[in-house]
Image (cartoon, rainbow, N blue to C red):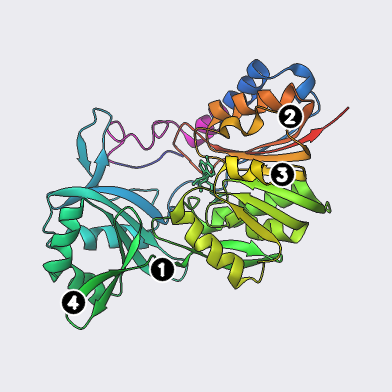
Amino acid sequence: MKLTCKYLGSCRGCPLGHLDIDEQRRLKKNKLIESLNRALPAEMIKNAVYDFVFPVFDRYRTRCDFIYSDGKLGWVDQDKKFLPIDECPLHVSELTSFASFVSKLPWPVKRGSMRLRVSPAGTRGIWLDLANLDIKEILSNSSVLNDLFDAGVIVEMGQKGKRVERVGDVYKLIEPSPYPWFKTEVDGKPADLNSLISSFTQTSPELNLQMIQHLKSFLADRKFTDMVEFGSGAGNFTLFLASYASTINVIENDNRNLIPLRQNIHQFGLQNKIYIFESVGSFFKNNKASAGLYFVNPARSGVGALFDQAVPAESIIYVSCHLESFLSDVAKLGSQGFKLINVTLFDQFPHADHFEILSFLELTP
Ligand SMILES: C[S@@+](CC[C@H](N)C(=O)[O-])C[C@H]1O[C@@H](n2cnc3c(N)ncnc32)[C@H](O)[C@@H]1O
């Protein structure tokens, strides 16, 4: 089975899209195994249990970061030129029809970044990450906002993800307002995850719930007094981890994630269990470093200095979408005595050349 897409060859999104899906999966599997063997000491991986999960082929993404340019939505191609995209086979159909609606609006700007999202309940949202002058223009020349609001679309604007509010005929910016744009798990059941349109979320609520099931299989019936989580985002994994810990110290540094994170903690009554630190520095100053489990899900750059000193934990779960930073971070753990117990390739990026890695490490004598 192969992907059908008229943009293959020019679009950067699916570099493996020209290959049969079974061939893609074989390549990814081999890449993970060979990279681990090359980068990590044999002793560290010799008992690791591998799993390969390929949960999806197409039509699964519920959000997309577009560039708007002169009446078209698209993104940058392999030659760094603007590539208008009418339809992407990875997007759910609601996202495709929403993008078509947005591209036809009478935008008073020539070019800018727009993130489009569709919630599990079908609500549509747009984040206009535009220059201040363009934001002013859209707020004062209200025709585009009238069309968006009349169609029930939720609008955020600017770097801070401020919500746009309609008051009579006038539009104004108010504080960022989280909304259930995503799904996670709380107390063993699927639950709404509040986020901003501009917050980080995984690629698809359904795949996210599957990933959580897989992570739960690593934890089995373990319980921890203290847990540390690095890169919580809006609390996607924090909320399911709350069932496994008495206390979770969370490190997250982006305000567009911290705002919904605080709301989610409050909504689920977890204020006496989950404590937030806005930087690794402030976390270490509070002497909370020692924990039964470190759960890390960093950005592509990896965990930074967090693993430079001995990690005071018995177990670590490392979730990564970037193989190279995963390998260099995990190599540091190898020299501290951690061993890989489980490694799962969870492919939430079909047709791309990367994949999600779910891993479980334990400190062994
Ligand atoms: C891949 S996202 C994961 C978010 C979340 N776990 C989820 O599943 O939605 C990585 C997160 O790490 C956060 N992050 C990146 N660098 C950080 C740092 N130096 N300190 C704290 N958080 C950081 C980002 O803001 C982002 O929320």
Q: Over which residues does the magenta segment extend?
A: 6-27
Q: What kind of element bears circle 1?
A: loop
Dividing the picture into quarters, in which one does residue 248 lie? bottom right
Dividing the picture into quarters, in which one does residue 151 lie? bottom left
Residue drawn at (56%, 53%), measured in percent from left and top? 207
Q: Nearer the viewer, residue 132 or 237?
A: 132
Earlier residue among tags 4 and 2: 4
The answer to whether residue 68 is left or right of residue 352 is left
Within-10-Å neighbours for mark 3: few <14, some 14–19, many 20+: few
Dividing the picture into quarters, in which one does residue 179 lie? bottom left
Q: Is residue 29 visible?
A: no
**Residue type at numbered disc 1:** Ser
Q: Which residue is mark 1?
A: 177
The label nearer to you, 3 versus 1, is 3
Residue drawn at (42%, 61%), measured in percent from left and top? 196
Q: Which residue is mark 2?
A: 310
Q: Is residue 172 visible?
A: yes
Number of marks in picture: 4
Pinpoint residue 343: horizontal percent, then vertical percent. 69, 35
The label nearer to you, 1 versus 2, is 2
**Residue type at numbered disc 2:** Ala
Earlier residue among tags 2 and 3: 3
Residue drawn at (44%, 48%), measured in percent from left and top? 58
The magenta stretch spans residue 334: no
Q: Nearer the viewer, residue 204 or 331?
A: 331
Q: CA distance from mark 1 to mark 2?
A: 39 Å
Within-10-Å neighbours for mark 4: few <14, some 14–19, many 20+: few
Q: Which residue is mark 4?
A: 170
Q: Which residue is mark 3?
A: 287
